[in-house]
Image (cartoon, helix red, strand yellow):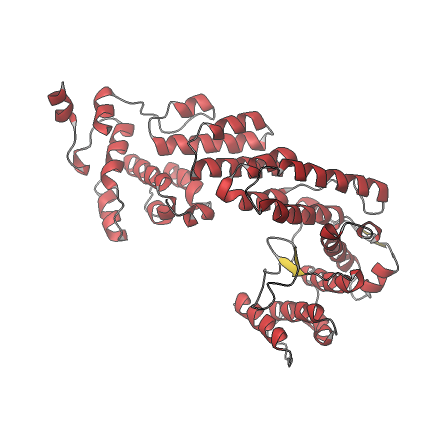
Amino acid sequence: MIAWLLACAPASFDECRGDLAEKTACRAQFAEPLPSSNSALEALVDGIEDLEERDALLVELAVRHPESGARLCALARTDHGDRQCRQVVGRPHLGHHKRP
Amino acid sequence: MIWLLACAGADPVLTGDGSLQSCDAIALEGHRITCRVQVAADAGGRGEDALARQACEGLDEGVWRDECHFRAGEELGRAGHTDRSLRHCADAGRFSRNCVTHAAWGLPPDATLRSDDHEAVRAAMSEFAQITETALDGAPEGVAPEAMDQLMARAWFNLYVGSGVADPAPTKGLPPWQAAQARTAWAIEAARLRQGEDLVTAWVEDAVLRGEPLADRSNVTGRYASPILPEGVQDHPHVATYGGGARLKVEDPTIDTRIAVLEGLYFVDRSPAEVFVPYLEDPTPEVAWTAAKLLALADPETPRQHADPMLQAYDEAARLKRR
């Protein structure tokens, strides 16, 4: 059983598999802590070809890290991603919130 | 942990259908959170306080639960449910102040209330003050007094501005903590109705000014004076104005009316900058400082010479703010 579970465990961002939610949750884990440079962040999400998957990750990370919402949401490419992102970047006080 | 989920399979849905149940079916935490916050905001807009509260209380304590109460509070406020709105604001933790500001400025005017109906105004304002005080019970420390200041400022603004009637009588005999807000609101409407008249005399003599009401009072716009507090001025008493602003206030009602009138003239953006110039020499420092602030905001190029260092500081701060 343990071996089966371990076999399922992805070792990197690029190995995340499953449906949209599974892949996004997995990628979010590997994306943290967030790269400090915008170019590194961009390179990370540019590796995701599917735009829906890309934006799902960006939104998930923006909610977890509202202080980085602006740079994450600037990379969103779909209308749906933009709409979801507005709940973070449209609320500037969230960006000023410091994580404990 | 995530690979356990991956192996077990997870719900692929990322957005809900507007119901709490659909939010809870979302596998991703971040998306689940924004779904609940949206449900709370939408419920607030419909006046459904219980659903909004349920949506927020299902979130873990922290920034997003605070944000959820903030969204619900501002939407309930905009829908006219002040008491429920403020109860959410009281629960909005680090965002309590932001929530109150939004709730206050979203408060819709009561079109049936007029400043020349003194009994009705007295009853309405007293009830509003009581409701807000009760609703803010339990707000984080320091929030309630600031909130009351903003809310009463808005309530008086709603009574006067755009109504077509500027009767100063209701601004008299008020408890000191709300008299200044009332005078600012009266002054804006008085300035809107009668530019160029001596409005302070009109206030002293209880002259009721009348004119055309605004067609749409739900969205009154004017020049918003930024809250400018140069060093040395912070300790002087201020009162909330509009859009997060503040003005100086003094105890003497007639002198305070001079300050209110200056602020009113500034808000009514047809007023030329020159109207503030004579007040730079006013014997009451707070009046002169207000004139300097408004003159610098309205037109930093108008020449004047200030010997008073506080006046210079005020003027300089206003210029910096304007840039």
- Seen at 35% across and 39% down, the residue is A64
Eyeballing the image, is B223 above or below B12? below
Residue B236 lies left or right of residue B13; in this view the side is right
Q: Quadrant of residue B275?
A: bottom right
The quadrant the N terminus of chain B occupies is: top left
Q: Nearer the viewer, residue B45 or B228?
A: B228
Residue projecting furthest to the front? B141
Residue B24 lies left or right of residue B259; in this view the side is left
User: Does residue B215 show up?
Assistant: no
Q: Position of residue A74 (x, y in %)?
A: 35, 48
Q: Nearer the viewer, residue B210 or B150?
A: B150
Residue projecting furthest to the top? A1
Residue B151 lies left or right of residue B33; in this view the side is right
- Seen at 67% across and 44% down, the residue is B218
Q: Position of residue B230 (x, y in %)?
A: 57, 67
Eyeballing the image, is B281 above or below B183? below
- Seen at 38% across and 36% down, the residue is A80
Q: Nearer the viewer, residue A34 or B192?
A: A34
Q: Position of residue A9 (x, y in %)?
A: 16, 28
Residue B306 lies left or right of residue A63; in this view the side is right
Q: Quadrant of residue A20?
A: top left
User: Does residue B83 show up?
Assistant: yes
Q: Position of residue B99 (x, y in %)?
A: 55, 43
Q: Quadrant of residue B233?
A: bottom right
Tell me how many marks there are.
0
